[in-house]
Amino acid sequence: MPFPPTSLKPRRPGRPGRPRKFSPFIVDKDNVYETVVEELKCVVFKTDTEGRWLFLSRAWTDITGYSVAQSTGQMFTKFLYPEDRDRVMGLFKPLIERSKEDCRHEVRYMTRRGGFRWLECHARLALDEDGQPDGIIGTLTDITERKLVELQNRNLILAQECTADGIALLNELGEYTYLNQAHVKMFGYESAADLLGKTWREIYHPDEIARIEEKVFAALTANGSWTGSATAKRLDGSTFPEELSLTLLPNGGLVCICRDATEKVASAKALHASEARWQVAVESIRDGVWDADLTTGAVHLSQGWKALLGLSDDQLTTTWAQLSTLMHPDDVKDAPETDDPHCVLKTGNYDAEHRMRTADGSYRWLLVRGKALFDETGKPVRMLGTAADISDRRQVHQQLLANLSREKELSEMRSQFVSMASHELRTPLAALTLTLEFLASYSTKIDANALDKGLTSANDSARRLSSIVDDLLLIDRVNQGQLNCAAVPVNLADQIAMLASDPYFTDAQRKRFVITCNPPGLQARLDPRLLRYMLLNLLSNACKYSADDAPVILRASQVSGAFVFEVEDSGIGISEADKARIYSLFFRGGNVGARPGTGLGLMVVKRCVEAHCGTITFRSSTGQGTCFTITIPS
Amino acid sequence: MPSPDLSRTILIVEDHEIIRDQIVAILEMNGYTAMSATNGSDGLQLACQSRPSLIISDVAMPELNGLDMLRDIRQTPELHHTPVVLLSALISKEDIQKGLELGASDYLLKPFRITELLQVVGRHLQSSPR
């Protein structure tokens, strides 16, 4: 009976792929064949001599999705994957020509869903009873899964060949069984064949071989894998650094993945050298360098800060907040906010001068500069900068400002002095010249009394001029720092007696003086010229600012070794508002009225007292009088 | 020397006794009627009472200084047109400018000569729109 039996009827419908059990009632041989064929996973087929399906077993439907009934009578080529048709026809040709008895090939058949399945076709020519070709019979076995694995393997190998990393497989003897092209080229070989069968020792120098065997293999054995670096050897004997990853296989073999690390090592060396130069630069300059992480507030300070502020090593790693506590309270407002440094970093630059506290509690002026680094969203995330000690510069700057201010003040004072001196001189000068011109012009028209009055006025004006000139000269010497105290032993009683008879005073004034010197023969060491000036001014003021007949008291005494001079009057007094200013240049009290004066005298008196290292004080009540007290240490 | 106009009276306001007395004496020698005050306050009061033809006033004086007195005079209707000559030892441009801006008719600097005084007096008495 021909196989497969032509009388076979289309199989009973059933669920595809579901195994069926043998029925105990099947007893005849055809039924046994049918059952066996139908249960096979592979397709059993027969075509006619034209190539039309005459028989297909049930597996056809399981594999392609096409029903047997629909397929039967169709040309088998119709079901072939188009790209495979010509090839398959060529494969069947020797069979049809009876030059071969059978053929075996792999071919894609289309599925009903539009895809394809890989089938292995094993076919032979079917002959009729006369030995004439009756068609083709054979089997179609689904090998799709195997073909996919093969494809994946091919892709995997392709990927291995394309990667820049070197990949190699070694057997348990350490011999290469596979090397990808990158591995071959990395070591300077032309072909994998140059290394296949050879051991890994071929590509390392003896010293490196010893190290690998001793250390790397120990770790590999212990951990099953090892990753590290090694020095590899090319075919020409030259060496290069490689990154190496080794993994033990269950069969004792090894997977080796390696990479040429020449550029990486060179980059690392260059980076290290660059960082080393930067570090040397940072540590060699006197300035402090700071590096702030604005996202965390962490700040790293260079060694230079130890010299700047006397910080310890521990303090070099700090936070923005801690660093801010060292800042002078008056300068904090100028510094970046500790909570939100971003607000002052809109420009990305920080440049400020402020004081920071050193370890000994003193403050140093620092010029702090910084530049922010931004992330891709424009947010400042890091800030680097320097801090330089500018205390000396600030001190010089402050001194210059003070000098400028003093110079300006002196200039204004000089200008004011010249202006006031001019004014004070011009008034008595006007009186003098007017009087003299009057006497000269009208001498024939005036009587003796008018002449006498004129001459007295001229004399008073001249004396007044002289006094003002004396004051001005003395003030000039004070301003020049030339008011020296030439102290000599003097008898105070004699000095005061001379003063009382000084032509500076009028007879009327002299009559008002009440002078006491206790003890009478009191000896002192003073500058007589300055003493005269001091007492003359105070007595003159006392006369001027009190009633014409009121007494003016001068007391000289020695108290606790110091010489004390008191000049007291019962005059107009000094108002509370004026008391703080009476020693100022050109200052005159608000209650002096038309009494002549320059506002120079008390200032000069004070300078004369200070030249003796003494003090001057006063007590005064408006309308009741004033008492000045000069105390000069012995 | 200009011819004196005896019908006119001159007020001298000056705190310096000698200068004040000398000006008064000079003016009287030249036929003027002179009266005097020692400060601006008294001067203003006397001016209101006497309606002088000319006022000669010092600037730096106690009580009321010459500039303040001048300001008050220019604000007093009956004295508004009275010429006022300031007499001062304050000789800076600023001081002179200040006096002229307040309405001073002239500014005589100390020290001055008798002829200068009399020329100024003559000039302002002749031009006074009394």
Image: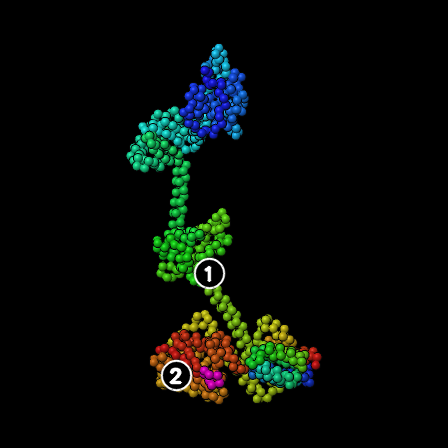
Q: Which residue is mark 1?
A: A333
Q: Which mark is residue B53?
A: none
Residue type highlighted by circle 1: Lys
The relative height of residue A515 versus residue A604 in the rendered view (above or below) is below
At a point 34% along the width and 80% down the height, the residue shown is A561
Q: Nearer the viewer, residue A260 or A504?
A: A260
Residue drawn at 60 percent across, 78 percent down: B68
| First in sequence: mark 2 vs mark 1 | 1
Give me the chain letter of mark 2.
Answer: A
Depicted A361 relative to depicted B46: above or below: above
Evaluate if marks 2 and 1 touch, with contact meaning CB atoms under 8 Å apart. no
The image position of residue A250, as x and y in percent, is: 33, 32
**In this picture, residue A623 sits left or right of residue A363:** right
Q: Nearer the viewer, residue A529 or A242?
A: A242
The residue that label 2 is drawn on is A556
Instruction: Compute the Cα span from label 2 to label 1.
Output: 59 Å
Quarter of the image for the N terminus of chain B: give it.
bottom right
Secondary element type, mark 1: helix
In x, y percent, where is residue A348? Answer: 49, 52
Residue B20 makes an appearance in the image: no
To which quarter of the image does residue A367 belong? bottom left
Residue A621 among those drawn in magenta: yes
Badge 1 sits on which subunit?
A: A
Task: Look at the image and give the residue range highlighted in magenta.
Answer: A620-626
